[in-house]
Structures are given as C-alpha cells and as structure tokens.
C-alpha cells in the first residue's frame, strides 16, 4: 500500500507542506508541478522552489511572490502585528477564485473543502456566521497558492493512505489583527479538535490554520509512524530559525503491513448464556471489532466463567466500549493498548472445474500464504456430494500452481 506519512514535530504550514510534497517528486514531476501552479491562473502569483538549510539539513523553501514581492513570515500568519494590505475575501470570493483556476476539478473541490474548514473555525472563534467571515491573512493570494499547491501535489502523488504524527502546535503568544492570542490560536485549536496535539518548548506558533486544515482534510490517521519501505523523503522548510530544524518531513513508500495501534478490552462473565455471548460477539464484529474471542476462566467462589476479549482500532474505542457494556452483564472492563502486525491480504477469483472459487492470499515480512475460501469449497462439496478434503485435493493442494 502506497503510504504518505507527515512528521510534524515542528508543526505545519501551507508552504512547508507544499515544499515537503514537492521534494517527493522526481525532477520531471517537480517541473510539471511548477508549470501547473504557475499557469493555474492565480493573478500576479509566481511560485519557485529554492534550497534551504536548517540545522545543517538541506530541504526546500517554497517561495511565493505576489506582484513580485514575497510575503514576510507568511506561514506564521498570526505573527503579523498589522493586517495585510491585500483585499479581504469572504468564502464566496475564495470559491470564485478557485473555480476560475486551470486545475482539475477534484483539486478545486479539495481546495474549497480546506477553506471550508478554515471558515468554520474562524466562524466559531469570532462568533459570526460563515457567510460573514473575511479571511484577512489566510485569504490572500499567496495563501490560496499554498492551499491549491498542496491539493495539486496530493493529486499528483495519489497515495493510498495518508498518516501524520501528532502535531506540535508551539507555545506562548502571537500577535494578530485582533490582538494578542495564545498558541495555538483559537481557529487552529478548533480545526485540530479530535487530532492529537502537544506543545513543545518552542515559543512560537508552529501550526497555522492553513496547515491545520490541510492536515485535517487529507490525513486518514494521526499516529506513530508505521512500518514503511521508504522510497522518498521530503523536507519542507519554514522561514524561521530555531534550535531544532524548522521543517515538515514527508515520507512516501510501501507499507509493510498494518502495524497500527489497537485497543484491547477484557472482561469476565459468569451470568450469561452461550446464546447471549454469541449475540454480543456478532454485534461487536458487525460494528468494527477486529477480533472477538472467549476463554474459559475460573472466577470467585470457584464459579466457572468466560473471559471476553475484544480488539478494535483506537478510533473505534469509545463505540466498542459502550457496546460491551450494553450487550454483556459485566460491571468492569480492563483496557490495554498494543500494536497489531498483519500481513497484506487480497482475494483473487479463479475459474476451476468446480466453478469460480476465491483464493485468499496473505503476504509480507518475507512470507506468503494462500488458502481457498471455505464458503466456495464447501458449496462445491455439497453440489458434488463429496467431502471438502476431496474438493481441495481436486483444486490442488499447492494453490500457487493454479
């Protein structure tokens, strides 16, 4: 599985994400991207990629010129003590600008959805309807270029899965048109709800609303880095200098199996019938549990009982926890967090003398396993009045030869 992973130890901003993704392209792809963004039709805007060194690491800084001038510290937009002199734009105006660009329709839709997240956050922060929101700093042409650039690069790279580390938002206070605000700024904090964030030792705004919205829109999961065979790495540099390299790193490669974090729940039961336990298992599987199984357990007062074990993705934790309480008689549940490693799996349909039979293939970590789908071979056995073993023998024990 083609996986893209963002390392946001120093936050994220639109120009930093753009530069990191740009570095993942080969030379031909980089030229193609610059041609596309500079001919997209953002009036007076020119984007160029230039080398940048932070703490001895060489990466790329995406330089965006508006009418020949570069916005100062644009990616930390709240650092401005005065508003930009550009015209303000409301959500309708931003959508009109994007609709007129010479870019694929899917890229336009992504860009508008990103701005929708920002507008919703600004609306919540200022207590105004979205229709009354004027974007100030994030509505300027260079910010539009950042959002469209990231959306265009994601369209060019087309990863199967996008993941990100927890986001360092920075700390301290920043100045903006509305006064002095805490870090993260209210709009950024609103966009990053349900996303794991933290404040490091850097006294500066590290994650902007634009960077937060781009991450929120494209990222499937915020977690530790999975096991990936890395094909390319990109370093998107910010403008400021800190003790730690001010960059977003992007890793692109093939996932070597699912090594995501999972939650395990355990509880013991001694007053449920087998039918009730079976029903609970069916519900848990249907609602997304990865594994559900039972073990025999000796309980207090020498009563025989059942230990129920349920494994689920961390994102499904709350839902599965409530379902266990709802469908069992337990009074308490123990929780454990662990990593789950699996082989990559796929199913191929084969034409055989018994009709179409599915073959389940699992591989990864240097091994490959194949097995005929039981439902298909049992059907063939019933139709022919023979045993499952005879069907398997007829198909060939070594499914590889088929």
Image (cartoon, helix red, strand yellow):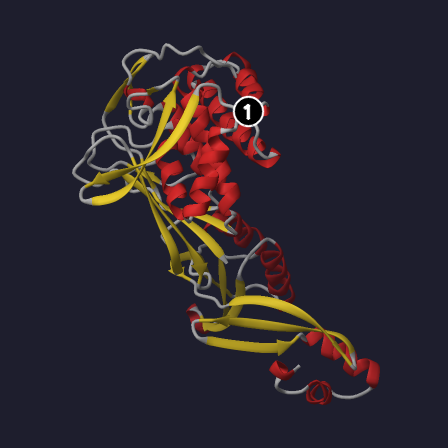
Query: Which image quadrant is residue 354 in?
Result: bottom right
Image coords of residue 27 (percent x, y): 41, 47
Q: Position of residue 393 (x, y in %)?
A: 69, 89
Name the residue rendered at 50%, 61% in the picture.
310
| Residue with the mark numbered 1 | 98
**In the displayed structure, would residue 284 be above or below residue 56?**
below
Question: Does residue 199 appear in this view?
Answer: yes
Rendered view: 163 above or below 201: below
- Direction left: furthest residue: 243
Of residues 133 and 64, the one nearer the viewer is 64
Secondary element under disc 1, as helix, strand or loop, is: helix
Counting labels gives 1
Residue at left offset 68%, top offset 76%: 374
Classify residue 352 by image quadrant. bottom right
In the rendered image, residue 4, in percent from the top left (x then y), is placed at 43, 50
Residue 13 makes an appearance in the image: no
Query: Residue at 49% of width from left, 22% of height from top?
Result: 42
């Amino acid at each position: 599985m083609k996986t893209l992973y963002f390392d946001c130890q120093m936050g994220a901003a639109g120009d930093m994400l753009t530069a990191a993704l740009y570095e993942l392209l080969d030379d031909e792809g980089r030229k193609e991207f610059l041609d596309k963004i500079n001919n997209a039709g953002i009036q007076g805007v020119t984007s160029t990629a230039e080398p940048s060194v932070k703490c001895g690491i060489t990466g790329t800084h995406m330089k965006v010129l508006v009418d020949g001038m570069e916005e100062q510290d644009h990616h930390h937009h709240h650092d401005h003590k005065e508003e930009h002199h550009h015209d303000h734009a409301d959500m309708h105006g931003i959508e009109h600008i994007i609709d007129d660009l010479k870019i694929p329709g899917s890229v336009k839709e992504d860009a508008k959805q990103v701005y929708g997240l920002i507008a919703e956050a600004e609306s919540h922060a200022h207590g105004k309807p979205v229709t009354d929101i004027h974007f100030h700093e994030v509505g300027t042409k260079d910010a539009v270029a950042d959002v469209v650039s990231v959306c265009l690069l994601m369209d060019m790279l087309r990863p199967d899965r996008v993941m990100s580390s927890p986001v360092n938002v920075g700390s301290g206070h920043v100045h903006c048109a509305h006064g002095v605000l805490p870090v993260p700024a209210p709009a950024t904090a609103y966009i990053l709800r349900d996303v794991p964030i933290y404040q490091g030792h850097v006294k500066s705004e590290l994650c902007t609303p634009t960077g937060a919205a781009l991450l929120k829109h494209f990222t499937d999961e915020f977690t530790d880095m999975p096991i990936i065979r890395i094909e390319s790495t990109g370093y998107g540099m910010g403008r400021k200098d800190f003790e730690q390299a001010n960059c977003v790193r992007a890793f692109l490669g093939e996932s070597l199996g699912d090594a995501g974090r999972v939650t395990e729940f355990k509880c013991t039961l001694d007053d449920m019938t087998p039918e009730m336990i079976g029903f609970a298992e069916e519900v848990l599987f249907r609602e997304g549990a990865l594994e559900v199984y039972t073990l025999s357990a000796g309980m207090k007062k020498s009563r025989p009982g059942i230990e129920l074990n349920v494994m689920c993705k961390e994102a499904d934790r709350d839902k599965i926890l409530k379902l266990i309480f709802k469908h069992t008689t337990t009074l308490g549940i123990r929780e454990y967090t662990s990593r789950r490693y699996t082989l990559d799996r796929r199913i191929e349909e084969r034409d055989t003398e018994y009709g179409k039979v599915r073959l389940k293939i699992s591989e990864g970590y240097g091994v490959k396993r194949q097995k005929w789908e039981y439902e298909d071979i049992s059907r063939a056995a019933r139709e022919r009045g023979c045993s499952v073993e005879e069907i398997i023998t007829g198909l060939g024990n070594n499914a590889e030869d088929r």
